Image (cartoon, helix red, strand yellow):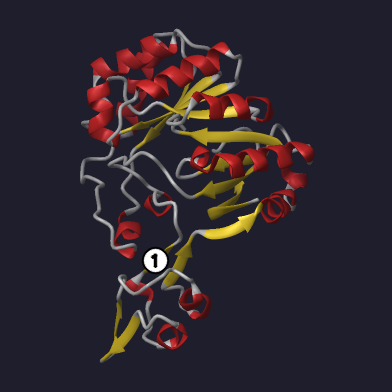
Amino acid sequence: MKGIVTDFKRFAIHDGDGIRTTVFLKGCPLRCVWCHNPESIAPRPQLAFYAEKCVGCGACVRACPQVAHKLENGVHTLDRNSCVSCGMCAEVCYAGALHLYGKEMTVEEVIRIVAEDKIFYTNGGGMTLSGGEPTRQRDFALALLLAAKGEGINTALDTCGMTAWETFAAMLPYVDTFLYDVKHITEAGHLRCTGRSNWKILDNLRRLSGAGARVEIRMPLFPGHNDDTETLHGVGALLSGVRITKMRLLPYNDCAHSKYASLSLPDTMPKVPLPDRSHVESCAEILRGYGIKVITE
């Protein structure tokens, strides 16, 4: 069994309980305007070029079998129409200007990395599958969960909820905690923010709650899109009717602009004032009024 892994984050402390190793899988069905991981959206490997790091050594030109790299008068250019994202150039780029997002790995290779940190998985720590959206690689994600449980490792699934209920049903016995995104309460608002309807997401949340799953809600707080009083009251009313352990508000930040540029993708992250502490707390208080445990740190 093989899948496409974007990256690993070791010693993660905000991706579930305890200290965790987060495995980022490629592919996502949503197109969130605030996405901080655009390198995880497409299902295939992608080559990123960080121009500000390039020293003009020409190693990539010599390594590329597709002649996608050119260096003229000290200026590096990348022909993405020729590039097949093989990663050979990234392997020889000592300056770190080139990086391949997405590597084919087996279940055994991934679990070997996760198990290396097993000694740190105290107080509920373990492996978190994230993305992108990990359920886009359903069979691979399920195999990773099964393998982790076989190693006695706690598991968490960081999900946007946009998948068939049958996928969650298959994973239920092997997921200790679902880290579940609620991005907007109305269908129109969700369409505007993510490009997709939220009816399936909300339906899956209710089903997970009904099945007795342990669920922690994640809500990115995005100024002008989902931080208004009406939306927050709607989210509060929804969550008061399902069983969750807690809710974490994630204030928007705009630190991912360089990723879009490196991948030659349109930068969709709007330039808006970042939410300050007092605004985040005022939003949290609205939600707490519905009996929800809200964390803002």
Say how many tags the image has.
Answer: 1
Frontmost residue, 288 versus 94: 94
Q: Residue lying farthest bottom?
A: 73
Q: Is residue 160 above or below residue 42?
A: above
Residue at x 32%, y 25% (from the top left corner): 184
Indicate the position of residue 110 as horizontal and vertical percent values: 66, 53
On the question of residue 117 being in view, the answer is yes
Indicate the position of residue 15 as horizontal and vertical percent values: 55, 38
**Mark 1 neighbour density, 10 Å: few (under 14) some (14–19) many (20 or more):** many
Location of residue 252 by image quarter: top left
Q: Is residue 248 left or right of residue 167?
A: left
Q: Is residue 258 above or below residue 34?
A: below
Q: Is residue 14 above or below residue 107?
A: above
Indicate the position of residue 181 as horizontal and vertical percent values: 43, 29
Name the residue carrying label 1: 48
Residue at x 74%, y 49% (from the top left corner): 115
Amino acid found under the numbered disc labelled 1: Ala
Q: Is residue 240 above or below residue 36?
A: above
Q: Is residue 177 left or right of residue 259?
A: right
Residue at x 36%, y 86% (from the top left corner): 56
On the question of residue 12 being in view, the answer is no
Frontmost residue, 133 versus 166: 166
Query: Element under label 1?
Result: strand
Location of residue 225 by image quarter: top left
Residue at x 34%, y 74% (from the top left corner): 82
Q: Is residue 223 left or right of residue 35?
A: left
Frontmost residue, 260 versus 143: 143
Indicate the position of residue 255 as horizontal and vertical percent values: 34, 51
